[in-house]
Image (spheres, rainbow, N blue to C red):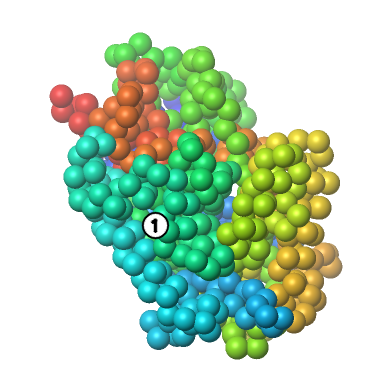
Amino acid sequence: MTPPPSTSRSYDAVIVGGGHNGLVAAAYLARAGRSVLVLERLDHTGGAAVSTAPFAGVDARLSRYSYLVSLLPRKIVRDLGLDFRVRARTVSSYTPVERAGRPTGLLVGGGERRTRESFARLTGSQREYAAWQRFYAMTGHVAQRVFPTLTEPLPTRDELRRRVDDETAWRALFEEPVGVAIEEHFADDLVRGVALTDALIGTFADAHDPSLAQNRCFLYHVIGGGTGAWNVPVGGMGALTDALADAARAAGAVLATGHEAVRIDADGHSAEVTFRSADGEGVAAARHVLVNASPRELAALTGDAPPAPAEGAQLKVNMLLTRLPRLRDPETDPREAFAGTFHVAEGYEQLAAAHARAAAGELPAAPPSEIYCHSLTDPTILGPGLAAKGMHTLTLFGLHTPARLFARDNDAVREELLQSTLAQLDAHLAEPLADCLATDADGRPCIEARSPLDLERDLRLPGGNIFHRELSWPHAQEGTGHWGVETGRAGVLLCGAGAVRGGGVSGVPGHNAAMAVLEQDRA
């Protein structure tokens, strides 16, 4: 635990929460010569972007919560001089399925020829692959136009529309349910499902939800880096937050772990943040307060009315295997299938059925999920002995399991869901996954699962929502301010995932909050 700061000290900025966005803001402001204090209630920084060794006596450091990188601008890495790298996955995705009584699947990646041949083998023609190329050419165009705006002052809707400069793409992604575009482009159920999954990560919605929550989720998943590519963080996600913490400290920021902010008082000219630690209560004065927490936590700290409740809808599972399981599909190598996103029970109709069942208050009969193997792309997260033995990690992210389903008995429902989710995977394997699980020092299988309620308890994610609330459009709306981080209280900014253009491991809200502070200081 960092020693508590002096209660008589005044800072230019106090940042509440030491997750990756708070660390980005701290590093930018400290490098600009501002005095910065970061208050973090846990005994470590990093928030949900951490690497841990979850299995007793096993030398494997997994990205325990967030696990892939797409939205982090290279600008932030360059500006802050971060020692942080990502690696591209050689395969985008593999989706197993049984057709005409035989196991097969769709492989996207490994080169244009192999992808085209996989589409033809699955669907019997070139039509779906041509449609795939058109669809993702459209999203790629939008990505190139929208992604650079994330670290600029918030554009108006009309300005962003002009920037996109493609009315067909604008209608498909910003105005109509994304299910319309998917159904217009694709005829094959499996191909439709693979396209739709990006609209459902951590978002409980149907393809045709009139709220367009699925569109906002889809947009953020296809614009990353201007390409939509999802990359593997070398060394695990903790490598990023460790580099950010180092950069912030090197620039002079004080990172006080074990210090929980409990109240913010702000009058528009100055502010005070009351905090608690093992040594008692203290107060830090500041010109600016940046809150790297959810809008719900912000309201609790300021005493304002809380926002509408948020709800997460995912199951996160971490595993360590003695070997990758063999597939029923004889034409696909597991080292390729698990290198990208391995889709399970994610056909278009399967996703619709899972959503409908969960909306009716029941666990999906065939829980959809997606899996990938970090260690195939980046073996550095495994100790030398594990890598030499051919061991691998697996990360599973389940969809359409809203927090409400776990309310009656979190432990029992989580276990029931875990077993039914793994059963869906086993249906495509030539051997049970359980036979491939490693065991820890106590002889227990190396597998851990987290429900939305677990994430709320451990990380204070409201309702377990990984985005803190529904994702926003990346343009100005009423009350969103100049940078999308402003709140109803002068001098208090929101720099967490719940800010406009927040969500995912991006650092964008942290960057934008720092820019807002520097802009206000110049005014």
Residue type for callout 1: Val
Instruction: Mark yes or no: residue 40 visible.
Output: no
The reply, left or right, for residue 153 in relation to residue 326 is left
Above or below residue 56? Residue 177 is above
Residue found at x 65% / y 83%: 329
Furthest toward the top, the residue is 267
Give the quadrant of the C terminus: top left
Q: Position of residue 116 (x, y in %)?
A: 43, 81
Q: Nearer the viewer, residue 239 or 486?
A: 486
- Please tell me whether mark 1 sits on a helix, a strand or a loop: helix
Residue found at x 55% / y 29%: 260
Q: Nearer the viewer, residue 219 or 461?
A: 219
Residue found at x 44% / y 45%: 177
Q: Quadrant of residue 221?
A: bottom left
Q: Position of residue 20 (x, y in %)?
A: 44, 46
Furthest toward the left, the residue is 523
Above or below residue 241? Residue 205 is above
Residue at mark 1: 222
Q: Quadrant of residue 230?
A: bottom left
Give the quadrant of the N terminus: top right
Q: Nearer the viewer, residue 493 or 104?
A: 104
Question: How many marks on residues?
Answer: 1
Q: Position of residue 208 (x, y in %)?
A: 51, 45
The local crowd at label 1, few if under 14, some if 14 to 19, many if 20 or more residues have their Cα within 10 Å, is many
Residue found at x 67% / y 80%: 100
Instruction: Mark yes or no: residue 120 visible.
Output: yes
Q: Quadrant of residue 432?
A: bottom right
The reply, left or right, for residue 186 in relation to residue 336 is left
Above or below residue 353? Residue 98 is below
